[in-house]
Amino acid sequence: MYQHMRAWILSCFLWIATVHAQITTETSLDLSAGKIKSAVFKSPAFILGPGEVQDKWYYGIDFPKGHIALKGFDAEVVNEDGNSVPLSETYLHHWVVNRFYHKTPITEEQRKPKNEILTSSDYISAGNDGICQANVLSQYFGLGSETRHTSTFIPDPYGIIVGDPNEIPEGYEESWLLNVHAIDTRGVVNSLGCTECKCDLYNVTEDSYHRPLRKDYIGGLRCCYDGTQCQLKEGVQGEKIKLYLKYTIHWMDWEETIVPVKTYILDATDTGERSVDQSSSHDYVGCHVEYDIPQCSEGIHSPGDCIDIREAHMVIPQGGDVIYAVAHQHTGGAGITLYGQDGREICTSLPIYGEGREPGNETGYIVGMGSCYPEPGSVQIHGGETLKLQSKYSKERSHTGVMGLFYLLIADPMENRALYSHQPEQASSLHVNRFLPIGLLIAFALLAGLGLAAYSIKKRREDGYEYIIA
């Protein structure tokens, strides 16, 4: 009975999250008067056998051309028939989409999948606005297992402006690259260990560049690079499967009414250390991207006391209105919060865990992250302000190679107010009225959840945290 009710509550939350994203999209479409375009593409095929890892870069991927405003980017792993593939079979560690400039023309040889980022002078990185750069977190979009239920849509009148001919260096063209990191977990001895890239399960002692691993490096990206193999159960024989990353891009052709946003990616491992990278126009910030979570000490029984908190402080060079924010975490994640210098909460992004078998609701996996959409002008960050990023993970089990990343879109406040005030009056009331049903649904789901809260806490204490099945 309890399991059925838990599944029903989760399905309510997933439905609410999906409707929330759809309503946000519909509202934007109304304000944009049908100007938003969408197109669906697929990455080149990648083939995986049981326990195998795919981690390649694809250059010159299919992407809308011209001077445009990006409004969203959604993705998922599908098979040859176009069907969604469950995380319990192919774990999507992450995908990222980067922009770059290249000398014309780009050849078919250059388009072939690569195991690493190209560093030739023929390529110039055109990464986001910071603050982790030099090929570290320079992407515009990117998620992981949570991709199916995380909204990336950018509301009106905002957009990420790309393809501006005035910004493209002479003799170069703008293009896009895609990185897909997927891990096949069919027949492996430890699903969670494989998805967390534990080095002993991959039997590796050096990274993809043939550099020896540190003695204290027990798991993470350096152990599950392209072509590695996670340990299988004895006698496992499985067929290879052909997969694709299907991605959907939403955009508008550039026009003066669009308000540009700056894209920042914050990292809970950011040490604040800086050194100039000669291959980039940006300073490199000491973002280590991944970190480990130790298990709770014996004798701690309260789930609230068994939480790891990783905290980083960073300065955003140019402030403005917060338009959108969302976090990226791995299994065990308990949410990320961004605070202002005065302690005010700017955004909290919480994970949604699956409780079933079907794609998008896989037990023990993060299948969605909550996105923040403040009313324009209601949440601001001041230029030069020191922000605090706080990433929380459960310590009921140890974890390796986890991430605490935070996507943040900011727009100039003066331009925001001037342009947004020109929107029709009915647009504002439409925004409020359309969200009333969502508020009621959330209230309903919360009330239903309260009826299970006491039992849920008791159950977690008895059974422990529910993770990916080993």
Image (cartoon, rainbow, N blue to C red):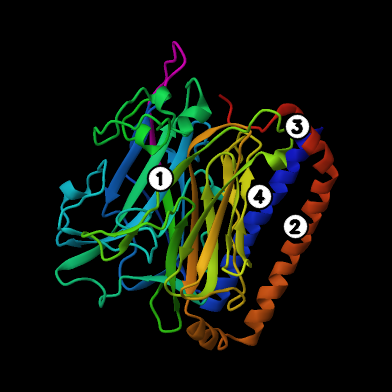
* Residue range (magenta): 230-244
Q: CA distance from mark 4 to mark 1?
A: 22 Å
Q: Which numbered dot is residue 461? A: 3
Vertical placement of 156 versus 271: above or below?
Answer: below
- Name the magenta segment's main secondary structure: loop
State the SS at label 4.
helix
Circle 2/circle 1 CB separation < 8 Å: no
Q: CA distance from mark 1 to mark 3?
A: 38 Å
Residue 376 in the magenta stretch? The answer is no
Q: Which residue is found at the position 42% from the left and 72% from the top? A: 317
Kind of residue sitting beneath label 3: Arg
Which residue sits furthest right? Answer: 451
State the SS at label 3.
helix
Badge 1 density bin: few <14, some 14–19, many ≥20, Cα 10 Å? many
State the residue position of label 1. Answer: 245
Q: Of the two numbered discs 1 and 3 on the same chain, state the one appearing first in sequence.
A: 1
Q: Quadrant of residue 396?
A: top right
Q: Of the two numbered discs 2 and 1 on the same chain, state the one appearing first in sequence.
A: 1
Left or right of 277 on screen, residue 340: right
Kind of residue sitting beneath label 2: Ile
Q: Nearer the viewer, residue 305 or 357?
A: 305
Q: Position of residue 16 (x, y in %)?
A: 68, 55
State the residue position of label 4. Answer: 14
> Can you see residue 164?
yes
Q: Position of residue 206 (x, y in %)?
A: 29, 30
State the residue position of label 2. Answer: 442
